[in-house]
Image (spheres, grey):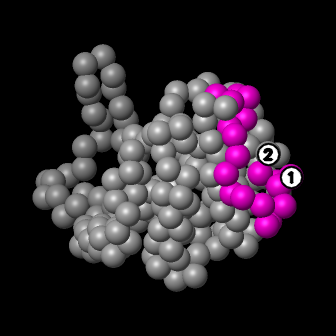
């Protein structure tokens, strides 16, 4: 089972942190730091598998990672997972990100965190691998994008709310609203209409 997925840059700044095992916040931060230092001190032409750090379970867990440009993708797994299977999963995840963001970079992970988490949830949920077919994952992402566009997205919600209020057929705007013991005085809004 996958215990954690960590993505951090060459300087150790976390760009994606997903734990599938409950840890307190301070322990999670220590795990990210320890994992970064374990991975950073390894040479690029060495094997991409190593024992987990002392905080995440030691020899019972493995860290499997890939280094792409400025980002490290690290999966912490227990002994039941195949190292080569996880390396392939990292490749699928990165290629899916690349397809969705058209040449993914660190800024995409920063500014589109919601979409990155959605892509990750299509691949892994609850520490279990759901999908490894990149075409199927991309099809689900595109379906989600179409749904968001058809609903107008969250950015259109305030405009829809304002137009709904303007289209209400109230004979006059109430000046006082009484709810139980609460009395709310409504200011004059004529300049906005």
Q: Residue at x 74, y 68 (%)?
A: 70
**In the picture, residue 25 is in which quadrant?**
top right
Magenta span contains residue 44 = yes
| Image quarter (top left, top right, bottom left or bottom right) of the C terminus | bottom left
Q: Which residue is mark 1?
A: 41
- Where is residue 167? Give x, y as percent: 19, 64
Q: Residues within 10 Å of mark 1 (few under 14, many from 20)?
A: few
Q: Residue at x 46, y 72 (%)?
A: 96
Q: Which residue is mark 2?
A: 38
Q: Nearer the viewer, residue 47 or 172?
A: 47
Q: Nearer the viewer, residue 134 or 138?
A: 134
Do labels 1 and 2 touch, CB within 8 Å? Answer: yes
Q: Nearer the viewer, residue 80 or 12?
A: 80
Q: Which residues are magenta?
A: 39-58
Query: SS for tag 2?
Result: helix
Q: Is residue 120 above or below residue 184?
A: below
Magenta span contains residue 79 = no
Q: Is residue 172 left or right of residue 35?
A: left
- Where is residue 94? Give x, y as percent: 54, 69
Majority secondary structure in the magenta region: loop
């Amino acid at each position: 089972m996958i215990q954690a997925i960590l993505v951090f840059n060459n300087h150790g700044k976390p760009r994606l942190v997903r734990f599938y095992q409950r840890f307190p916040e301070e322990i999670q931060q220590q795990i990210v730091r320890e994992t970064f230092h374990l991975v950073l001190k390894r040479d690029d032409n060495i094997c991409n598998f190593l024992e987990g750090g002392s905080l995440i379970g030691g020899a019972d867990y493995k860290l499997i990672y890939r280094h792409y440009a400025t980002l490290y993708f690290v999966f912490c797994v227990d002994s039941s997972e195949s190292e080569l299977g996880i390396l392939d999963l990292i490749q699928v995840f990165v290629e899916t990100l690349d397809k969705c963001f058209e040449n993914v970079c660190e800024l995409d992970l920063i500014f589109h965190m919601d979409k990155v988490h959605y892509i990750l949830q299509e691949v892994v949920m609850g520490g279990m691998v759901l999908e490894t077919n990149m075409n199927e994952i991309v099809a689900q992402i595109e379906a989600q994008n179409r749904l968001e566009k058809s609903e107008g997205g969250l950015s259109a919600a305030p405009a829809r709310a304002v137009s709904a209020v303007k289209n209400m057929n109230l004979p006059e705007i109430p000046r006082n609203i009484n709810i139980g013991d609460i009395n709310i005085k409504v200011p004059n809004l004529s300049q906005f209409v």
